[in-house]
Structures are given as structure tokens and as C-alpha cells.
Amino acid sequence: MRSDDDALAIVFNGEIYNFQKLRAELQERGHRFRSTSDTEVLLHLYEEHGDAMLEHLEGMYAFGLFDRRRQRLVLARDPSGIKPLFYRSAESAPAVGDLLAFASEAKALLVDPRFERRPDLASLAGYLAYL
């Protein structure tokens, strides 16, 4: 989903339990909504609070939000990790250059032919130890 002015774009997996309350608060501050989705609430919440938006969220979620004006990507997941967020960076694929790929399932990253398919044993040990 994109913001009205195309300055923000988000991909979202999950559910924001308190999105109706957040939506009402944002509407009181002058935000206008095109849909009834919790995804759009995230866009407006970022416009209002920036990274501090995460302090307002209750739910299970993982998302990537691109801010075109600031040329930055915000990746976030719920604090309990109910919705996972996997990523691969250019470090794991040096020939690729500046690349970051992310998904809510690890297998989605394996279909990108630009990445080498070999395990990172240190990361695997960390995953097995801490999930």
C-alpha cells in the first residue's frame, strides 16, 4: 500500500489489534483514510510519529516501510516475534551490490537467484539458540 502522495510504501503481514483506536486518534489529528485496513493506519502512524510509531502498536506483525523522502527503509516485527522477519543483505551476496531482501518466510529469500545458497553457520547457531 502507498500513501496518498506516494512518499511512503508499505508491505505488511499481520494484525494490529488496536488499529481502530489508533485510526480514531489519527483522524482527530486530521489524517484522512481511503480504506478501513490496519495497513493504512501504519502509514499514517509513521507520518505522525516516525520510528516512534512502534511504541503505539499492539499486535502481531512484520512490515517493511519505505520512506521515499528520507530514502530509508524501516523493517519491524512485533516484539514477541510472532510474525517473523527474515532478511538478506549485500554482505551475504557481495556480487549483488547494494541489496536488501526481506520476507516473512525464509523460503521466499531462496527464490532470488542473486543470492548464494549456503548456510551462515554463526547465524544458524544464533537462531537455534534464541529462535
Image (tube, rainbow, N blue to C red):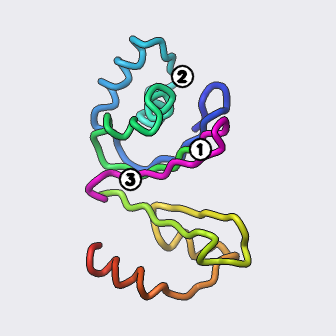
Residue 18 placed where, x, y %? Answer: 28, 32
Residue hosting label 1: 66
- The residue that appears at 45% across and 61% down in the rendered structure is 104
Distance of label 2 from label 1 (alpha carbons): 19 Å
Q: Is residue 113 visible?
A: no
Q: Nearer the viewer, residue 55 or 23?
A: 55
Q: Which mark is residue 100?
A: none
What span is in magenta?
A: 67-81
Q: Nearer the viewer, residue 102 or 98?
A: 98
How many neighbours does mark 3 have within 10 angstroms: few (below 14), some (14-19), or many (20 or more)? many
Three-letter amino acid code of the residue under disc 1 = Phe
Residue 92 on the magenta span: no
Closer to viewer: mark 2 or mark 1: 1
Question: Closer to the N terminus: mark 2 or mark 3?
Answer: 2
Three-letter amino acid code of the residue under disc 3 = Arg
Residue hosting label 3: 77
Q: Is residue 1 left or right of residue 69?
A: left
Residue 30 placed where, x, y %? Answer: 47, 12
Residue hosting label 2: 34
How many neighbours does mark 1 have within 10 angstroms: few (below 14), some (14-19), or many (20 or more)? some
